[in-house]
Amino acid sequence: MVFGTFSTCEDSKVSLCSPIKAVLGLFMLSSKKTVSALFTIFGGVYAFGIAQSPLSYSIIDRDGSNVISVLELIDSFDVGTRESGNCLEYYWLKDGLTAYEYCDHPN
């Protein structure tokens, strides 16, 4: 075995070239479509994450920039709940500090 040299698919005795060409072909033929699909998937997961978070938008945006970063979104799922009386407290699991408190006050 010689290191530092590459053989072409025609020189290869192992038939790994066709699957490799197929995978590379998917990315090479439609690179604009692939990038668009990846952005669409990422955007959908991001929006779904914000919608499914137990915290409100203003609480998730911890630095007050009006933009929820990926790390802030991930942190929004790292919360626990505690009950005290008529209140439900959401707290950050990493430090135990209160993130949000919801109190149900009947009229």
Image (tube, rainbow, N blue to C red):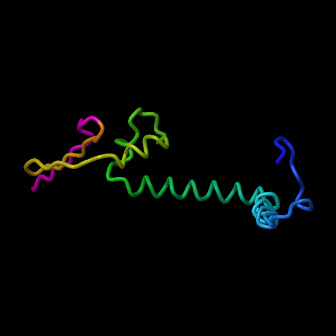
Instruction: Check residue 48 for magenta coloring.
Output: no
- For the point 30% across and 38% down, the residue is 94
Instruction: Check residue 100 for magenta coloring.
Output: yes
- For the point 82% across and 48% down, the residue is 1
- For the point 27% across and 40% down, the residue is 99
Q: Is residue 104 above or below residue 23?
A: above
Examine the image and state in which quarter residue 58 appears: top left
Image quarter where the C terminus lies is: bottom left
Most distant residue in the left direction: 85
Bounds of the magenta span? 95-106
Along the line of sight, the residue nearer the viewer: 83 or 11: 11
Query: Is residue 7 rendered to the left or right of residue 53?
Result: right
Query: Is residue 55 rendered to the left or right of residue 67?
Result: left
Residue 38 image position (x, y, % from top left): 64, 56
Query: Is residue 92 rendered to the left or right of residue 103?
Result: right
Most distant residue in the right direction: 10
Q: How many marks?
A: 0
Along the line of sight, the residue nearer the viewer: 9 or 91: 9
Residue 25 image position (x, y, % from top left): 80, 62
Residue 35 image position (x, y, % from top left): 70, 54
Query: Is residue 68 rendered to the left or right of residue 94?
Result: right
Residue 29 image position (x, y, % from top left): 82, 61
- For the point 34% across and 48% down, the residue is 56
